């Protein structure tokens, strides 16, 4: 199975998680700076080479109404850019409340507030990826 890199795209940072080679589990990997954009794309390309051209899964933010707002449009534009410039296959997955869930997991794990800021984005990416892997295993997709 092709590896999957999941991205939790924020304004300043992008959390990254990776699947195991068999596609059973998600592991938080790293956090990339979102700007400057060229540096972000180079860092993503480096990860893509390291993980042998994985599927890139981008968390798709939706409004509480379920509609796609400007944040979702930016993620979709980034997916198009990754496809065009890096030649990587992309998909999106609903990221509803993943950052809140990641915060809760880290709090329950006893991670201090200052330390949570360092890992919340990649933890959120792992939650996004875990949902997608569950879909692949059980056939229930929740986003386009």
Image: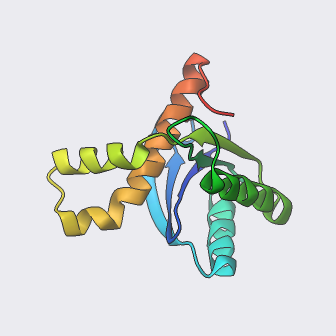
Give left or right: position of 125 versus 7: left
In terms of depth relative to the viewer, which is nearer, 15 or 10? Answer: 10
Q: Is residue 27 visible?
A: no
Q: Quadrant of the C terminus?
A: top right
Image spot of residue 40 (x, y percent): 62, 74
Q: Nearer the viewer, residue 14 or 24?
A: 14
Percent coordinates x, y for residue 68 in the rendering: 64, 44
Whole-percent x, y for residue 87 in the image: 83, 58
Q: Which quadrant of the figure contains the N terminus?
A: top right
Which residue is most to the front?
65
* Residue occupying the point 39% across, 50% down: 99
- Picture coordinates of residue 95 (x, y %)? 51, 42
Residue at 46 percent across and 63 percent down: it is 30
* Left or right for 26, reference 55: left
Residue depicted at x 68% and y 50% = 54
| Position of 1 relative to 28 (above/below) | above
What coloring was used for the rendering? rainbow
Residue beneath the point at 57% across and 41% down: 21
Asked which quadrant contains residue 42, the reply is: bottom right
């Amino acid at each position: 199975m092709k590896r999957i890199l999941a991205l939790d795209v924020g304004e300043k940072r992008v959390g990254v998680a990776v699947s195991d080679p068999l596609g059973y589990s998600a592991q938080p990997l790293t956090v990339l700076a979102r700007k400057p954009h060229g540096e972000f794309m180079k860092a993503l390309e480096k990860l893509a080479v390291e993980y042998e051209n994985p599927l890139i899964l981008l968390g798709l933010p939706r409004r509480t109404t379920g509609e796609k707002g400007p944040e979702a449009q930016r993620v979709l534009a980034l997916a198009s850019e990754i496809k065009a410039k890096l030649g990587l296959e992309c998909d999106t997955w609903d990221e509803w409340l993943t950052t809140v869930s990641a915060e809760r997991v880290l709090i329950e794990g006893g991670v201090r507030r200052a330390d949570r800021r360092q890992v919340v984005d990649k933890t959120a990416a792992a939650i996004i990826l875990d949902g997608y892997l569950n879909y692949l295993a059980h056939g229930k997709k929740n986003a386009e």
